[in-house]
Image (cartoon, rainbow, N blue to C red):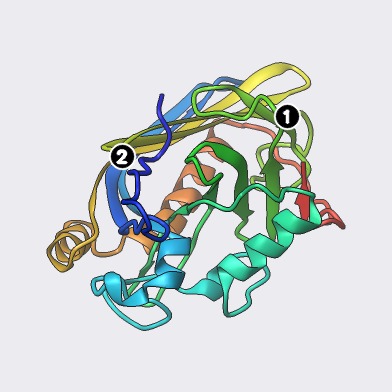
Amino acid sequence: MTALPTPAAAPGAGPTLHKPQLGIGVVRHRRLRPAQHNFDYPTYFLMLPMRSLRRHPESAPALLRNRFGLLSFHDRDHGDGSADALAWLDALLQAEGIHEATGEVWLHTYPRVLGYAFKPVSFWHCQRADGSLAALVVEVNNTFGERHCYLLAGPTLAYGRELQAQKVFHVSPFCAVQGRYRFRFFHTPAHTVARVDHDDDGGPLLQTSVSGRLQPLTAAATRAAFFGMPLMTLGVLLRIHWQAIRLWRKRVPLFNKPEPPQAFTSR
């Protein structure tokens, strides 16, 4: 699959200006054992060009940044909770020796809805100047208010290729902190998919994905998304607990929550 589009700039022009996008799609989850458990839910999400927004914040009037609204984006919901999420990301990449991510940074994340945020996972697509991938950062939040980042980088990094990371962070009481994640990302100008599968010591355990069609983030699109699913982020949290009740009724074993990893980022 191709990377996020990076149109060629005119001679003498500065960096390409990208516009925020809204994804309309579905979250899918499949548990393979010890009991089969499947569900899918409609969803929507933001795809934000963070470098373009830093250079030209006025170019995205429909994006309510660090302000209350039907849908909004707040920097402090990401990274170390500081006022500039992109500055945090750049510092992380530099500390990890990734210096070539000078192109666009696309953040795939849930918005705040009426000021409320719960973001189980966000994906930072860090591009080189030519639009190819230099790194991916998978930012995970659990229901205990903890956060951890998995940094994916290296010569095999590309859209469509499988990427792996050891699981070190507690997410669900129905999964032990063991095994590995297998990631695959696909992207075209009109569609995006992020797939995250979890294998434990017994083999494949969970298969999950979030996918959606992409469209410009306009005021009309924001209103349509909100009124189509007015309690979307609250619904994410309620559905997590409802699915936990269903798993408990299926007698899926529970695991105690361990201490979070000492390092905020693993790779």
| Image location of residue 198, percent across then percent down | 64, 29
State the separation of the CA atoms marked 1 and 2.
25 Å
- Mark 1–mark 2 CB contact (< 8 Å): no
Badge 2 is on which residue? Answer: 212
Q: Identify the element where label 2 is drawn.
A: strand
Q: Which mark is residue 134?
A: none
Quarter of the view holding residue 86 = bottom right
Quarter of the view holding residue 72 = bottom left
Q: Residue shown at 39%/64% (left/top)? A: 111
Q: Nearer the viewer, residue 149 or 50?
A: 50
Q: Residue shown at 61%/52% (left/top)? A: 139
Split into 4 quadrants, where in the image is the C terminus?
A: top right
| Image location of residue 54, percent across then percent down | 46, 71
Left or right? Give the position of 62 relative to 138: left
- Asked if residue 144 shows in the view, the reply is no
Q: Residue shown at 47%/41% (left/top)? A: 131
Badge 1 is on which residue? Answer: 180
Which amino acid, mark 1? Arg
Q: Is residue 106 above or below residue 84?
A: above
Q: Is residue 144 above or below residue 166?
A: below
Q: Is residue 59 above or below residue 216?
A: below
- Asked if residue 139 shows in the view, the reply is yes
In the image, farthest residue toward the front: 12
Left or right? Give the position of 221 relative to 53: left
| Image location of residue 196, percent across then percent down | 55, 32
Which amino acid, mark 2? Gly
Left or right? Give the position of 158 relative to 11: right
Q: Which one is in front in this view, the residue at disc 1 or the one at disc 2? A: 2
Marks 1 and 2, the one that precedes in the sequence: 1
Q: Identify the element where label 1 is drawn.
A: strand
In the image, farthest residue toward the right: 262
